[in-house]
Image (cartoon, rainbow, N blue to C red):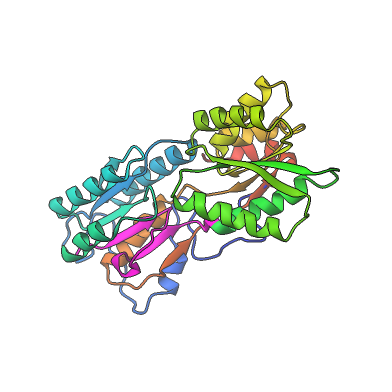
Amino acid sequence: MIARRDLFRTSAGVLAAGALVPALDACSKSSPKASSPGSSGSGGGKAIKLGFSQVGSESGWRTANTTSVKDAAAKAGITLNFSDAQQKQENQIAAIRNFIAQKVDVISFSPVVTSGWDAVLNEAKSAKIPVILTDRQVDGDPSLYVCLVGSDFEAEGERAAHLMEKVLTGMTGPINMAQLEGTSGSAPATQRAAGFKKVMAASDPSWKIVISQDGNFTRDGGKQVMAAFLQSHPEINALFAHNDDMAIGAIQSIVAAGKKPGTDIKIVSIDGVHDGFVAMSQGQINAIAECNPLLGPQLMDTVKAVLAGQTVEKWIKTKESDFTADQAAAALPQRQY
């Protein structure tokens, strides 16, 4: 969607845009250097070919993520074959098979959902093409991919719940909370909900999620679902949104219902995109747990390390922070997405 990580901050070799990922060297079992830009992992002098399948363009976060991947590939001298799945798993599977047919050096993708990947990943394995996941996890056989470069979504849910604790401090009476879930079956939706629930179970017993529904990570989805929430549950006084875009959509419906977002209904979301910070600086979102989309530099360094024969960590986590409304105005000018 508070700075994206404090209590649950992960520390596995993260990369600010344009910097090298220190964790890759630290966890290598051997010392071969990653190939230089414009060369393949085999040292043959030809450009590395990377096939990348993106989920879609459903949010500001995803747009920033796509830009980061494209910019980092160009800077690294890696030839990028980019495919937009438009949030459909069948499109991603077709794209991966196309990458295999093109004999790319590495395949990377951010999976739409967690299940149903073993068959096509086995095809990539048979073709001896390494696969690197970005942003989202998959279920199934972990030997079918080299590693994941991305966030800890369950920790993000936990951090969001702790932010909600701060936001709700001083409120009296029952907390009637709504939850706007991400795309059903996706790793961030499932794991953010689980992390939030875990902290909520140990928190104030007055917390109660009165309604929860999939808003598909889109602004329009958040707007439509929140409008329905307010009709069926006018008592809602808190909202946990799985991303900023759904929270921003929900704000439109809250205003249309004659209520004041951030005051009548406290809002915590996840991501930290520019529009989310604008809403937070205006007091409409109370807090945001950051999810860093700038994974491009990490991905390109991981691609080079893998092709150079280095052993990398199975999960290369990103650094993130948590932000509250009182920090938003000062932080906004420095936001890169």
Residue lying at the far front in this picture: please name it. 232
Is residue 83 located in the magenta-colored stretch of the structure? no
Q: Nearer the viewer, residue 221 or 110?
A: 221
Residue at the image point whose x is 63% and y is 55% from the top = 197
Q: Position of residue 64 (x, y in %)?
A: 45, 40
Q: Position of residue 200 (x, y in %)?
A: 69, 55
Q: Tag count in the figure?
A: 0
Is 7 located above or below residue 232 in the figure? below
Q: Position of residue 321 (x, y in %)?
A: 62, 52
Is 118 located above or below residue 50 in the figure? below
Residue at the image point whose x is 33% and y is 66% from the top = 146
Which image quadrant for residue 331?
A: top right
Is 114 located above or below residue 233 in the figure? below
Residue at the image point whose x is 50% and y is 32% from the top = 221
Answer yes or no: is residue 60 visible.
yes
Is residue 139 located in the magenta-colored stretch of the structure? yes
Q: Would you say 318 lies left or right of 137 here?
A: right
Residue at the image point whose x is 34% and y is 48% from the top = 75
Answer yes or no: is residue 179 visible.
no
Q: Position of residue 87 (x, y in %)?
A: 36, 40
Q: Would you say 100 lies left or right of 108 here?
A: left
Which range is magenta? 128-153
Q: Quadrant of the N terminus?
A: top right
